[in-house]
């Protein structure tokens, strides 16, 4: 029981890190299963290169797009955007939207980079693709057996008759693994630099960030509870009036504009300390005032978690 509680506490304290770790493990496992059960290099000079590249890059592209689809922040940004685009200021300033897209892309890139790195470390996809590349074959077979270049595409299937061509398979695997480790090193260095920069540029302290996350968790739990209760009461009243042929009593429900304002992406303003768009909305000075964009509002990368708490996960949408 104590071990289970420790695991639960770890999940609550580091949900994003554990989420990325789970995505990485699932992607690595999926790549290995894919390469063993599905991948069969055609060992053809015409097909090796496109076949290997398709298995190396197309799943990575699919995972990248899936990362966008599964991100609640994507749909928070896009929902109603076309309808708002017909009005002045629809979809927000371009620079702010571009920054949000960069953040979404960085998050979505975790799985595809994992796929490519693991695939390169195993080497099967690269061996197949590289053996079908005529320029690379000429380079590798320079000074070797004259039949090496023609036999190289057969090497991944161990059908090459020229001994030099079969020996080059080890060299191709070494190249693949070196590229894989280089990719991993580049990603880790970039991640370290990026994390350090956004932490350094944070307008709030480490402890306030912890408090902020606690507040958001509580706000979303209460919002979901109150929304469920309000929706239940409204549904009961409407059904009751339908069967009794009576007029329903009035319920105060937020307007479309109210929902749009609290659903917009969070922007930070150093002059006003609000922990969410709902917090900003209830503290507006005038009822007709828009909270979407004010002078001094900026998108802060480290505060991206404000747009993706509990009720706004893709599963709930």
Image (cartoon, rainbow, N blue to C red):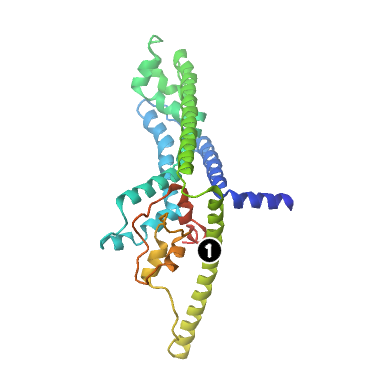
Q: Is residue 221 above or below residue 141?
A: below
Asked if one can make out residue 46 in the rendered structure from this viewpoint, the answer is: yes
Up/down of 281 relative to 234, above or below? above
Number of residues whose C-alpha sits closer than 10 Å to that of mark 1, classed few (under 14), some (14–19) or many (20 or more): some
Q: Residue at x 46, y 82 (%)?
A: 238
Q: Residue furthest right?
A: 1
Q: Is residue 226 left or right of residue 253?
A: right
- In x, y percent, where is residue 146? 37, 11
Q: Is residue 5 left or right of residue 158?
A: right
Q: Nearer the viewer, residue 55 or 196?
A: 196
Q: Residue furthest top?
A: 143
> Which one is in front, 268 or 132?
268
- Identify the residue under disc 1: 219
Q: Secondary structure at mark 1?
A: helix
Asked if residue 115 can be seen in this view, the reply is: no
Q: Residue furthest front?
A: 271
* 190, above or below 273, in the image: above
Q: Is residue 239 above or below residue 33?
A: below
């Amino acid at each position: 029981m104590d071990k289970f509680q420790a695991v639960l506490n770890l999940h609550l304290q580091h949900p994003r890190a554990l989420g990325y770790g789970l995505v990485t493990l699932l992607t690595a496992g999926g790549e290995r299963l894919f390469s063993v059960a599905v991948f069969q290099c055609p060992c053809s000079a015409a097909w090796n290169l496109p076949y290997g590249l398709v298995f190396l890059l197309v799943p990575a592209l699919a995972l990248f797009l899936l990362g966008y689809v599964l991100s609640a922040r994507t749909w928070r940004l896009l929902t109603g955007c076309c309808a708002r685009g017909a009005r002045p200021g629809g979809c927000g300033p371009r620079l702010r939207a571009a920054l949000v897209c960069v953040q979404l892309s960085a998050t979505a890139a975790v799985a595809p980079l994992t796929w490519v790195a693991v695939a390169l470390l195993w080497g099967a996809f690269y061996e197949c693709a590289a053996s079908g590349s005529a320029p690379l074959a000429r380079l590798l077979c320079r000074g070797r057996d004259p039949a090496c270049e023609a036999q190289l595409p057969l090497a991944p299937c161990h059908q090459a008759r020229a001994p030099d061509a079969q020996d080059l398979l080890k060299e191709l695997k070494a190249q693949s693994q070196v590229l894989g480790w280089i990719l991993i090193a580049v990603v880790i260095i970039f991640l370290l630099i990026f994390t350090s920069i956004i932490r350094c540029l944070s307008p709030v302290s480490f402890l306030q960030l912890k408090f902020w996350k606690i507040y958001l968790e509580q706000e979303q739990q209460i919002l979901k509870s109150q929304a469920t209760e309000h929706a239940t009461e409204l549904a009961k009243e409407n059904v009751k009036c339908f069967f009794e042929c009576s007029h329903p009593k009035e319920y105060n429900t937020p307007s479309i504009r109210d929902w749009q304002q609290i659903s917009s992406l969070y922007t930070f303003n150093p002059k006003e300390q609000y922990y969410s768009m709902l917090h900003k909305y209830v503290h507006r000075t005038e009822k007709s005032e828009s909270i979407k964009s004010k002078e001094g509002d900026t998108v802060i990368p480290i505060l991206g978690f404000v747009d993706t708490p509990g009720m706004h996960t893709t599963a709930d949408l």
